[in-house]
Image (tube, coloured by chain):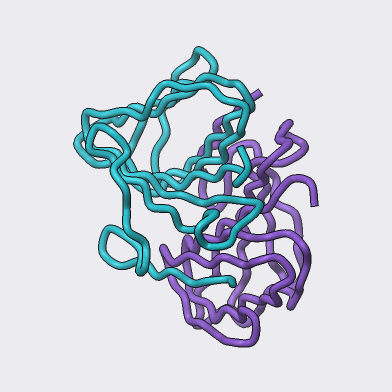
Chain colours: A cyan, B purple
Amino acid sequence: MGHVRRRVGDGWDGVTPTAYGNGSERHVLAGRGDGATQVELRVFRVPPGEATARERHPHEHAILVLGGRASVLLDGAEHEVGPGDHVFVGSMEEHRLTVLGDEALVFACTAPVDR
Amino acid sequence: MGHVRRRVGDGWDGVTPTAYGNGSERHVLAGRGDGATQVELRVFRVPPGEATARERHPHEHAILVLGGRASVLLDGAEHEVGPGDHVFVGSMEEHRLTVLGDEALVFACTAPVDR
């Protein structure tokens, strides 16, 4: 039931991205539909000038920036991040990623499957 | 309790890598020591000519290759992967990543905190 998904162009082989508001895309690399029961891995692409939703929820996120730059709101403070940088969002911490510059923000984001 | 860890050189600001056999390094970007209770995110660096342990365990992995190339053993078959490619390892699936070529293999790997 494991799988390999190869990077092809702006996406992954066998993964159909879904719209995620404001022209963003969500690529689910591993999730419930693949038989995952523990950890979900998604990649988001957010266009220049846009941001993710400002939200707060019980589940944690571990994020890795793959491309572009962003200002990350994390519990009241803003942090500028770029390729290779990591952000951990704890349970119930308010967070939002706002794209900086003219390049799309691409980031990998994990969350538990059950949430 | 959330955090930002910036990429610096071959590692991350505030993260001390630990040895992981055969000259490999493990960088824990988010884990129990950071207050994470759900999802752990680690980055492994495996030198040329080496491989990760061949193992099988109840917890799942969602993997993203950040650099280098590898042959991935996944439940009896080998798959060649490179930068940007993703591997999902299901519960109790045998797996091992063997470095191909003369560049170190660097990959992000998630697992549940409780395992």
Where is residue B4? Give x, y as percent.
Answer: 55, 31
Residue at 56 percent across and 37 percent down: it is A61
Q: In which quarter of the view is residue B16 placed?
A: top right
> Which quadrant holds the N terminus of chain A?
bottom right
Residue at 37 percent across and 62 percent down: it is A15
Residue at 64 percent across and 87 percent down: it is B76
Task: Name the foreground residue: B7 vs B2.
Answer: B2
Relative to residue A72, is residue B82 depicted above or below? below
Residue at 48 percent across and 65 percent down: it is B86
Where is residue B109? Give x, y as percent.
Answer: 61, 57
Relative to residue A31, is residue A9 depicted above or below? below
Relative to residue B113, is residue B20 depicted above or below? below
Where is residue B113? Give x, y as percent.
Answer: 74, 45
Q: In which quarter of the view is residue A91 placed?
A: top right
> Which quadrant holds the C terminus of chain A?
top right
Horizontal side, residue A5 vs residue A35: left or right: left
Where is residue A113? Give x, y as percent.
Answer: 60, 46
Task: Name the foreground residue: A8 vs B107.
Answer: A8
Task: Name the foreground residue: B51 vs A41.
Answer: A41
Question: Residue furthest toward the bottom?
Answer: B77
